[in-house]
Image (cartoon, rainbow, N blue to C red):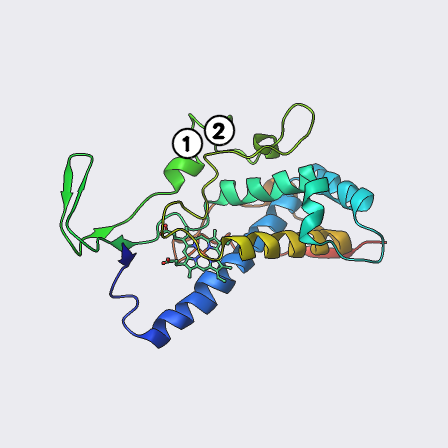
Amino acid sequence: MQYFPGLLNTKTGASILDLVMAGTETIATTLQWAILLMMKYPEIQKKVQEEIGRTVKSGSWATYEDRKNMPFTNAVLHEVQRFITLLPHVPRCTAVDTHFRGYFLPKGIIVIPSLTSVLLDKTQWETPHQFNPNHFLDAEGNFVKREAFLPFSTGRRNCIGESLAKMELFVFFVGLLQTFTFQPQPGVSESDLDLTVPQTTFTLRPQPQATCAVLRE
Ligand code: HEM
């Protein structure tokens, strides 16, 4: 399969899309969601900060290797990615005539897979529509991989930036929570924070909402 041909008809256009949208917008938007969810669930934010305090030496920054000793933080980040279904519909088109499960898809037809169908699948997740880091933790608090965790899609043309994205998300998220506590602005309560998605663009962005980044001791 290829990208929707109308989107990428020049090499320059393709490079801009890759750098600005695929490479930057995805990470920035996921971190916006992560901050919003930490404001909404302060008890989860506190547990992440406690784990950071136990694992990352004071005065230094986390490395990606540290995730192995930070199951709760790792689970929270995975759950952020699952819950937000950032990029549910990347359009592709068939490169050749294709027969798939009884359907005939002629060459060049647009195919739009739905990652939401797996990331929010009620047969795969205990509470699909609820932000619940326990989806990625066992009873002893160890991190568990889940087969249905597919925010980067699957198959031959899945996200080429997956490893980089996971590393960036972990290092930035831990650095942010090491330095700041995120709170709603005065007069706004956690229940006022809105987790609905305003418009479907390339990525599913959160509603614009203010945050107070309070410097930690
Ligand atoms: C939270 C971060 C990210 C998510 C959730 C994400 C998700 C995805 C998804 C769902 C696809 C479509 C795969 C398919 O059609 O099967 C994709 C494709 C792609 N992603 Fe990402 N991505 C992320 C970050 C990145 C980063 C950091 C880069 C590069 C630095 C990147 C580069 C690409 C490229 C080049 C493609 C197209 C691959 C191809 O056509 O073969 N992505 N991504």
**Foreground residue, 88 or 216?**
88
Identify which residue, 90 or 192, lies in the foreground.
90
Return the x and y of residue 116 as percentages of the image width and height.
Answer: 39, 40
Q: Of the residues shown, which amino acid type is indicated by label 1?
A: Asp
- The C terminus appears in which quarter of the rendering? bottom right
Q: CA distance from mark 1 to mark 2?
A: 6 Å
Looking at the picture, how far across and down is residue 90, in whole percent?
35, 53
Asked if residue 93 shows in the view, the reply is yes
Note whether ligand 1 is within 8 Å of mark 1: no
22, above or below 104, in the image = below
Instruction: Name, please, the residue furthest toward the front.
Output: 156
Say which amino acid is labelled 2.
Trp
Quarter location, residue 79? top right
Residue occupying image coordinates x 65% and y 48%? 188
Image position, residue 129 (x, y; %): 48, 33
Q: Position of residue 162 (x, y in %)?
A: 50, 53
* Vertical order, 191 against 127 (above or below): below
The residue positioned 50% from the left and 41% from the top of the image is 82
Q: Quadrant of the N terminus?
A: bottom left
Viewer-side residue, 11 vs 22: 11
The image shows residue 38, relative to residue 24, as above or below, that is above
Q: Which residue is mark 1?
A: 121
- Quadrant for ligand 1 reads bottom left
Determine whether label 1 and label 2 are within 8 Å by CB: yes
Q: Residue at x 72, y 47 (%)?
A: 66
Q: Specify the label residue 125 is tagged with.
A: 2
Residue 4 as seen in the image, left or right of residue 72: left
Whether residue 186 appears in this view of the structure is: no
User: What secondary structure is found at the residue carrying circle 2?
Assistant: loop
